[in-house]
């Protein structure tokens, strides 16, 4: 079987204060891409890791309480820039996407789920359980917009089958073989959001590490560059977030040639 190929993409971006994302950075607004990845799988075809923003988020932000999400995190999205529109340009119809791996349920990662009606959603059960009952302000406070999820989300969700990781994946203790063929591995990176996962993808050129929101920048994924305390306060579990960041850094130090992607920074090339 040939290897999976990872294509980094973005669907919209959000504005944030640079000083919040990294301690010591200037207090100015900066646009951060809402990144996601297309994984070209030799058997399963186009697989998505998140979707970036989508029309459903834009609609939710027009109504209370979603409007608050837009006030805290201004969103920019052109309709030609959704995951669905970009895949169409590449020749993939929505029904070609049978699998979407969801890193976590923040609105900037799941805004396009409704655009792929045939997809199964692979995620950590722990990402959904603490949020599933939240509505209104309680949900928005967690950057979760329930109306952005398809109505049949639960029926289409498949929980990642975590098991003990082999020693060469240290310090990750748990891993899930997403398709059961060794092509895509999910590892837990909880804290920023409950049950967040990253992916390890052995590509033909080498290993790609898709770290989702475990760091705000590629540099912060490789070196300890903590965000502002205000950003830490917004994490689901700050101490878990710190531990996940440390695990990611240790893994990248042990695999210095791996290519790392984070959701809100430009993708890194091969080293
Ligand atoms: Zn997030």
Image (spheres, rainbow, N blue to C red):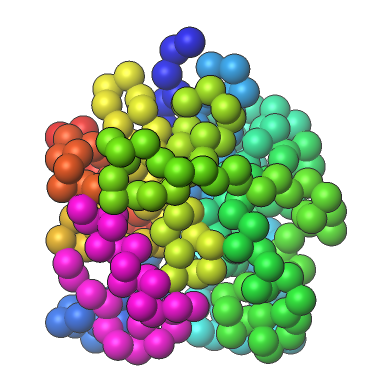
Q: Is residue 244 magenta?
A: yes
111 or 179, which lies in front?
179
Q: Quadrant of residue 117?
A: top right
| Count of numbered marks | 0
Residue 267 visible in image? no
Coordinates of residue 252 in the picture (x, y in percent): 21, 47
Q: Predominant secondary structure in magenta?
A: helix
Residue 6 visible in image? yes
Query: Is residue 182 found left or right of 154 in the rendered image?
Result: left
Residue pictured at 38% horizontal, 46% vertical: 210
Vertical comparison of 129 with 182: above or below: below
Q: Which residues are magenta?
A: 224-250
264 or 67, which lies in front?
264
Vertical comparison of 253 with 229: above or below: above
Residue pictured at 27% horizontal, 77% vertical: 227
Q: Is residue 107 magenta?
A: no
Residue pictured at 15% horizontal, 82% vertical: 24
Query: Is residue 5 found left or right of 143 in the rendered image?
Result: left
Coordinates of residue 229 in the picture (x, y in percent): 30, 88
170 or 264, which lies in front?
170
């Amino acid at each position: 079987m040939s290897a999976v190929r990872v294509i980094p993409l973005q669907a919209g971006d959000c504005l944030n204060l640079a000083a919040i994302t990294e301690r010591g950075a200037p207090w100015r607004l900066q646009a951060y891409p809402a990144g996601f990845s297309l994984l070209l799988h030799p058997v399963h075809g186009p697989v998505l890791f998140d979707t970036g923003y989508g029309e459903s988020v834009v609609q939710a932000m027009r109504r209370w309480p979603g409007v608050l999400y837009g006030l805290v995190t201004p969103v920019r999205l052109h309709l030609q820039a959704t995951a669905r529109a970009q895949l169409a340009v590449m020749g993939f119809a929505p029904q070609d996407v049978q699998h979407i791996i969801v890193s976590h349920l923040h609105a900037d990662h799941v805004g396009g789920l409704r655009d792929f009606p045939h997809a199964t959603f692979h995620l950590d059960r722990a990402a959904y359980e603490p949020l599933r009952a939240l509505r209104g302000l309680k949900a928005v406070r967690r950057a979760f917009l329930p109306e952005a999820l398809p109505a049949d989300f639960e029926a289409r969700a498949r929980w990642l089958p975590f098991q003990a990781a082999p020693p060469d994946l240290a310090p990750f203790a748990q891993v899930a073989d997403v398709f059961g063929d060794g092509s895509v591995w999910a590892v837990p990176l909880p804290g920023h959001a409950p049950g967040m996962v990253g992916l390890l993808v052995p590509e033909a050129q080498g290993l790609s590490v898709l770290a989702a929101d475990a760091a705000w920048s590629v540099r912060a994924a490789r070196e300890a560059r903590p965000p502002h305390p205000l950003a830490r306060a917004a994490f689901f579990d700050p101490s878990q977030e710190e531990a996940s960041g440390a695990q990611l850094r240790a893994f990248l130090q042990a695999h210095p040639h791996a290519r790392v992607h984070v959701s809100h920074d430009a993708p890194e090339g091969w080293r």
